[in-house]
Amino acid sequence: MSEQTAMERRPENESSLDRSRSNAVYVPNVDVLETPEELLLVADLPGSSSSDIDVRYEDGELTLHGKVNDRQPGEARALLREYGVGHFNRVFTIDEQIDAEKISAEYARGVLTIRLPKVEAAKPKTIKVKARD
């Protein structure tokens, strides 16, 4: 990510649950990538369905909210859980100029991918240097 791109980042020692609310809220793992054309956000949400996920962009903030369904079948007892279950919420502050009309989101195989295209003014420009002899 360039120095110009500011995204909210969870500290390494932060728990995967937000206990500041009355109900625990799952905080999904997210990768944020940048290309010259767009920001790309990839969130691991196994156990969700596209109808359980709400994505909003307003005033420079991208909000992910929804729920991850329990993947524990029948009477099985979980011995180890590395993925969260329950409601999730994540908010990112985006410093880049984003074309809000062209934002897209896709959910496939437990992964949410959000594309945030940059406006033309925010894309890098190459300036041709003319030779003067």
Image (tube, rainbow, N blue to C red):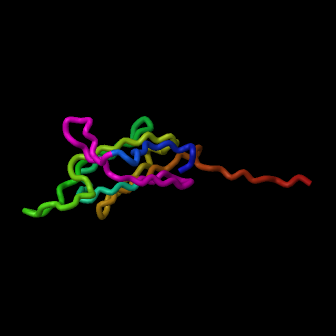
User: Residue at position x 50%, y 40% from top?
Assistant: 95
Task: Please identify the quadrant where the C terminus is shown.
Answer: bottom right
Using the image as rendered, state which of residue 80 and residue 30 is in the foreground: 80
Instruction: Please indicate whether residue 29 sits to the left or right of residue 86 in the image.
Output: right
Please name the residue shown 62% across and 50% down the image.
124
Magenta residue span: 15-41
Does residue 56 show up? Answer: no
Q: Position of residue 132 (x, y in %)?
A: 88, 52
Identity of the residue furthest to the left in this view:
75
> Residue 32 in the image: x percent, y percent?
45, 52
Spot occupied by residue 25 in the image (x, y as percentages of width and height) = 25, 43
Q: Quadrant of residue 50?
A: bottom left
- Compared with 102, 79 (above or below) is below
Q: How many marks?
A: 0
Residue 48: tell me if it is visible: yes
Q: Residue 115 location, x and y as percent?
A: 43, 53
Question: As displayed, is residue 108 above or below residue 62?
Answer: below
State left or right for residue 75 relative to residue 101.
Answer: left
- Residue 17 in the magenta stretch? The answer is yes
Q: Quadrant of residue 31?
A: bottom left
Looking at the picture, does residue 20 appear above or below residue 113? above
Please tell me which residue is depicted at 25% across the width and 53% down the height of the picture.
Answer: 84
Q: Is residue 65 left or right of residue 2?
A: left
Q: Nearer the viewer, residue 18 or 59?
A: 18
> Furthest-right residue in view?
133
* Residue 35 within the magenta-colored segment of the rendering: yes
